[in-house]
Amino acid sequence: MKKAFGHCYFTIADDAGVPDLSGVTDMTNMFFGSTFNEDLSEWDVSKVTNMSQMFASAKNFNGDISKWNVSKVTNMSSMFAGTGNFNGDISKWDVSKVTDMYGMFSASYFNGDISKWDVSSVTNMSGMFYDAKTFTGGALSDWNVSKVTDMSRMFEASYFNGDLSKWDVSSVTDMSSMFEASYFNGDLSKWDVSSVTNMENMFAGYQEDLSFISVFNGDLSKWNVSSVTDMSHMFYFSSFNGDLSKWNVSSVTDMSSMFAGNSWFEISTVFNGDLSKWDISSVTDMEEMFFYNTSMSSENYDKLLNGWSTLDAGESQIPQDITFGAPKHYSCAGKDAREVLTGTYSWTITGDELVELRADVPTLTLLTSWKPITSLTPPEATIGCSSTGTKITATHPDGLLPI
C-alpha cells in the first residue's frame, strides 16, 4: 500500500468496514500530505515492516492507533514528520525491531509519553525531534541507545531539556547539530563520545534568522574527543564557557567559526577559556574561529598564541598557511608568538589588535606626614613592547610641581 493515499482528499464510508491488510508489508508514504483523519484503530498492521513517512505532512490526522501491533516494523523514518495535529497515545507500541527513526517526529506537535519504548535496535536517530516545538521530554532517560550511530540534528530547534545523562552513546559517530538552536542544557559530562567524528554545529545558536543564542553551558571537560575531525561552528553563537583545556583535538581538521559570535546582532560568544595546550597538528581550517568573540581575554589569547606557536612533545607539526579568525585583543606577552605564526608558518591572522601591557598600580600607604616637595624626577614609560621603544616623560604643562 505504498503511497496508496498520498496527497489525497477523501473520507471512508461508515459501512466500508475494516480492510484486509494481512498481506501488507509496506505502508511507505501511505497518507503523505493527505487530509485523511478517519478511524484506523482496528487496522491489522502486524505484517508491516516499513512505515516510513506514513503520516508525513498529513496535517489533519490525529486518529487512535494506540493498539496497533507494530512489532515487525523496522523503518519508522519520518513517520509523523510535519503532522500538525497528531498527539495520540503510542506509549505501548513494541518498537523493538525498529532500526531507523530518522526524522520520526520532526516538525510535529507530538508530545506523548514514549519513555518505555525499547529502542535498543535503532541505529539512526538523526533529526528524530528536529523542530519538534512541543516535545519537552517525556522522560527518555532510560532509553537504550547503545546501537545508535547517527544522532545528528536529533534535538535541533526543539524545546527538549530532559535527562540524557545516562545514555550510552559510545557507538555514535555523528553528533552534528544535535542540540543546535535548542533549549537543552542537561548534564552530558559522563557521555562516552570517543567514537564521534563529527561535532559540527553541535551546540550552535540558530542560524536562519540569527535570533537565538544556544543556552547550553554544561561540563564537557572530560570528554574524549580524540576521534573528532570536524568542530566547525560547534559553539557558534552560544552561551558555552566551560573548561576545554584538556581536550585532545589532535584529529580535528576543521575549527572554522568554532567560537564565533554574530556581528549582525552585535552579540559576542562568551567563551573565555585556556586552549594553549591544544594539539592543532591536523587543523587545516580556522577561518573566523573566534569571529566577533569579544569575551576572550588578552591573557588567554596570549597563552593560545604562545602554545600554538610552540611544537610540544607528541605534536607532529605546527600547520602552515592557516587563515585564523582571532579573538579581539593580544598583548606584548603574545606579540612574538603571533609573529612566529604569521612569519615562520605563514598564517594570516585577522580580527585582532595589540593592547599594550600596563604595569600594575602599587597600593598606596596611608599618608602619615607630609612636607613640601621642591624637586621630583619625572616618571618615564616606553611606547611599544620592548625596552627600545620610544620613551615618554610625564611633565606639567607649566613645568611646575606637582606633575
Image (cartoon, rainbow, N blue to C red):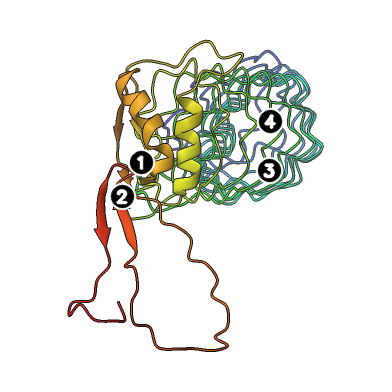
Hey, what amino acid is under mark 2?
Ser
Looking at the image, can residue 153 be seen?
A: yes
Q: Provide the secondary structure element on which disc 2 rests.
A: loop
- Residues at badges 4 and 3 in contact (C-beta under 8 Å)? no
**109 left or right of 401 in image:** right
Type of the residue with mark 1: Phe
Residue 18, quarter of picture? top right
Residue 105 at x, y = what percent? Answer: 58, 37
Q: Nearer the viewer, residue 56 or 357?
A: 357
Q: Quadrant of residue 220?
A: top right
- Residue found 47% across the figure and 49% down from its top: 297
Image mark for residue 219:
3
Residue of label 2: 263
**Which element type, helix, strand or loop, lies under badge 4?**
loop
Evaluate whether residue 35 shows in this view. Answer: no
Residue of label 4: 223
Tell me the distance, in whole angstroms, between the alpha carbons under discs 4 and 3.
9 Å
Q: Are marks 4 and 2 in contact (CB under 8 Å)?
A: no
Tell me the residue at 40%/88% (across/down).
372
Kindly report the distance in space between the C-alpha atoms of the residues bearing marks 4 and 1: 25 Å
SS label for mark 3 = loop
**Closer to the camera, 58 or 282?**
282
Residue at image coords 33%, 57%:
381
> SS of the residue at dot 1?
loop
Tell us which disc is closer to us: 1 or 2.
1
Residue for badge 1: 291
